[in-house]
Image: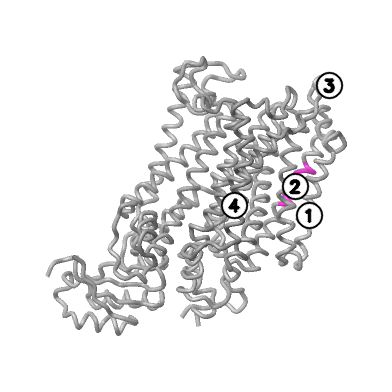
């Protein structure tokens, strides 16, 4: 009855039936965790514990623990913030934008990518909060609460405040979108379970019964949430870029920032999705669901966004020269040839040159090469933010104030803390939540798998 | 016989067979209580004759509420309650209020719509759903027919219709 294309590759390989999908995904949740999972989880938790020493020291002593000085007032903290937020963007792009474009291959990776978004945004949000110095008073500075500190209300003209609204909306809408998708899958696990697990997953599944009317509403909610999340994700990194673009610092004060930041965010986010999914599919034996086809498609997105980023780098350099504004051109010239030249050229190599290797089909369908390049891209994207932030600040209009930035152990430690936090949360998710959206994979199975459609 | 307690269940393996079966069963005059599926089946709501969901309207209204709340809040705080000159701008610097307005529109639209969805579909952590067949969250589509609601028709006849429309099993299920 259903027409199966002989040209298109199936989205799910291995001739899976509906029951196989349920079984393959649920068994990770139901079985005892493997030794590999325990080791990975303990490593992540260990990094979290070590990093928390630096975090506690920073909260106790203040941000004087960091390497900031009066010239370079933003460095690793904001670099890490922008880097983590950027990584988060891929999850929303996969689940919302690809849903609107009816890209069915998203169904096997959207769950884990959205989880990654949520955990990455948690890590990102930590940095501005700590950077307040006294985060316990932060609510008065960040939220419009009446207070007696003097200015009464927060400043709605400031992009830093827009960021508060953007990041918190992004986090909560992504969380809701993710959870709505999880409800039917929790019900599947509930109906397979007995005892305590049945009670827990029963509560998590919110009493889902799979009625046609509920599915109809669910589909409607998913579509509208996707429609809301798409402009939202673009607005978030646009507003993050406004933190820089609305200032008068040479190297920051450019109108190219919003699209360039959004492309960079998707670029680094897809790289992180690939890093995580290549490991997850191997450890959980999900090679039939996350196929080489998926990896290749994600690599194509990396070529596209990586090339946009490359063009943006060259454009801003050209405009800095063409504008005839001396400090602006100096900022860029100094980036490429000044004391931070190594950071600039690391960024150029990792972000502009390395993704071009994916034009070669052998490389973009190779798991080892993809894994290696996905890490290279994320290193490059961290350096992009470091270059934009530190090299623009360290030589300002007043040569007598020129300075260098040297990270302290607390800078490194707080960054490590977020890595520990991210991976601890991700491993917990991978063990206790269904890592693949079973219901959505089943809905695309028939048109894509030879056994079911015969 | 009491309503909503005794059901005949048609078990279907395939979504396309199910869609045709729903049409046939309804055409023969049997009233379907509900169909339970492990994944969204496209077109099922049409053959069951359900009206389009009005959730998008809820989302729009909540979004408008977010827009108006955000603009009111910002104009009240920045223009009326505590006016300050910031960066030489007007007190009511309208373009600067757009990002927060947009974010609050999205926030309220999303949360309002999801809240309405939860309430209308009775989704809550303590809800105890009636499970007609546990396989309906795994690999089977379950068509539930309320016997009391179809008292005009003979039970054997309903089972006959289900069988002939392609059900792989026909079961009975009673609730307390």
**SS for dot 3:** helix
- Please tell me which of labels 3 and 2 falls first in the chain: 2
Q: Could you tell whether A331 is left or right of A47 in the image? A: right
- Please tell me which of labels 3 and 1 falls first in the chain: 1
How far separated are the C-alphas under marks 2 and 4? 28 Å
The residue lying at 63 percent from left, 30 percent from top is A58
Residue labelled with disc 2:
A380
Q: Report the span colored magenta.
A: A306-315
Tell me if residue A310 is in the magenta stretch: yes
Q: Is residue A67 shown above or below A347? A: above
How far separated are the C-alphas under marks 3 and 1? 36 Å
Quadrant location of residue B144? bottom left
Marks 1 and 2 close (CB-CB < 8 Å): yes
Q: Is residue B129 shown above or below A251? A: below
Residue labelled with disc 1:
A354
Q: Could you tell whether B172 is left or right of B152 in the image? A: right
**SS for dot 2:** helix
Q: Is residue A188 shown above or below B123? A: below
- Please tell me which of labels 4 and 1 falls first in the chain: 4
Marks 3 and 1 close (CB-CB < 8 Å): no
What chain does badge 2 belong to?
A: A
**SS for dot 1:** helix
Q: Which mark is residue A42?
A: 4
What chain does badge 3 belong to?
A: A
- Please tell me which of labels 1 and 2 falls first in the chain: 1
What chain does badge 4 belong to?
A: A
Q: Select label 3 or label 4 by which is in front.
A: 4
Q: Is residue A40 shown above or below B82? A: below
């Amino acid at each position: 009855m259903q027409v199966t294309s002989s040209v298109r590759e199936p989205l799910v390989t291995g001739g899976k039936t509906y029951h196989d999908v349920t079984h393959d995904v649920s068994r990770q949740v139901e079985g005892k965790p493997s030794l590999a999972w325990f080791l990975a989880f303990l490593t992540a938790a260990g990094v979290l514990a070590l990093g928390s020493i630096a975090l506690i020291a920073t909260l106790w002593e203040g941000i004087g623990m960091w390497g900031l000085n009066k010239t370079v007032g933003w460095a690793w903290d904001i670099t890490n913030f922008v880097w983590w937020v950027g990584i988060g963007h891929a999850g929303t792009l996969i689940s919302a934008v690809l849903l609107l474009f009816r890209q069915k291959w998203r169904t096997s990776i959207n769950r884990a990518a959205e989880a990654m978004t949520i955990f990455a945004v948690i890590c990102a949000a930590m940095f501005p909060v700590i950077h307040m110095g006294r985060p316990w008073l932060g609510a008065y500075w960040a939220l419009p609460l009446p207070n007696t500190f003097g200015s009464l209300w927060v400043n709605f003209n400031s992009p830093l405040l827009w960021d508060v609204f953007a990041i918190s909306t992004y986090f909560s809408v992504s969380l809701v979108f993710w959870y709505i998708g999880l409800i039917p899958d929790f019900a599947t696990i509930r109906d397979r379970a007995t005892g305590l697990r049945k009670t827990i997953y029963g509560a998590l599944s919110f009493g889902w019964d799979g009625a046609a009317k509920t599915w109809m509403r669910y589909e409607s909610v998913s579509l509208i949430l996707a429609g809301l999340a798409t402009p939202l994700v673009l607005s978030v990194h646009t507003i993050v870029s406004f933190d820089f673009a609305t200032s008068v610092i040479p190297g920051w004060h450019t109108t190219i920032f919003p699209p360039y930041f959004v492309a960079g965010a998707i670029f680094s986010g897809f790289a992180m999705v690939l890093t995580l999914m290549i490991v997850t599919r191997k450890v959980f034996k999900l090679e039939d669901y996350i196929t080489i086809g998926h990896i290749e498609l994600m690599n194509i997105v990396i070529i596209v966004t990586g090339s946009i980023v490359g063009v943006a780098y060259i454009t801003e350099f050209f405009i800095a020269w063409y504008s005839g504004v001396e400090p602006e051109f100096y900022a860029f010239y100094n980036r490429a040839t000044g004391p931070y030249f190594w950071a600039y050229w690391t960024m150029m190599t990792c972000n502009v040159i390395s993704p071009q290797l994916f034009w070669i089909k052998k490389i973009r369908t190779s798991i080892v090469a993809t894994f290696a390049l996905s890490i290279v891209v994320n290193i490059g994207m961290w350096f992009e933010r470091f270059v934009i932030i530190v090299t623009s600040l360290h030589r300002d209009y007043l040569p007598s104030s020129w300075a260098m930035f040297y990270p302290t152990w607390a800078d490194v430690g707080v960054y490590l803390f977020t890595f520990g936090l991210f991976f601890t949360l991700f491993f917990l998710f991978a063990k206790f939540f269904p890592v693949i959206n079973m219901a959505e994979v089943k809905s695309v199975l028939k048109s894509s798998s030879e056994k079911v459609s015969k | 016989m009491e309503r909503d307690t005794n059901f005949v269940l048609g078990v279907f393996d395939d979504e396309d067979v199910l869609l045709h079966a729903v049409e046939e069963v309804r055409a023969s005059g049997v009233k379907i209580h509900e169909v339970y599926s492990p994944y969204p089946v496209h077109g099922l709501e049409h053959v069951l004759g359900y009206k389009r969901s009005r959730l998008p309207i809820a989302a729009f209204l909540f979004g408008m509420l977010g827009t108006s709340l955000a603009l009111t809040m910002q104009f009240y705080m920045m223009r009326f309650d505590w006016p300050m000159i910031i960066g030489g701008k007007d007190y009511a610097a309208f373009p600067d209020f757009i990002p927060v307005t947009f974010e609050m529109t999205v926030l309220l639209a999303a949360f309002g719509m999801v809240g309405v969805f939860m309430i209308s579909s009775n989704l809550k952590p303590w809800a105890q759903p009636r499970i007609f067949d546990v396989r309906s969250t795994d690999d089977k589509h379950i068509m539930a027919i309320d016997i009391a609601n179809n008292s005009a028709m003979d039970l054997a006849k309903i089972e006959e219709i289900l069988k002939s429309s392609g059900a792989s099993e026909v079961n009975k299920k009673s609730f307390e």
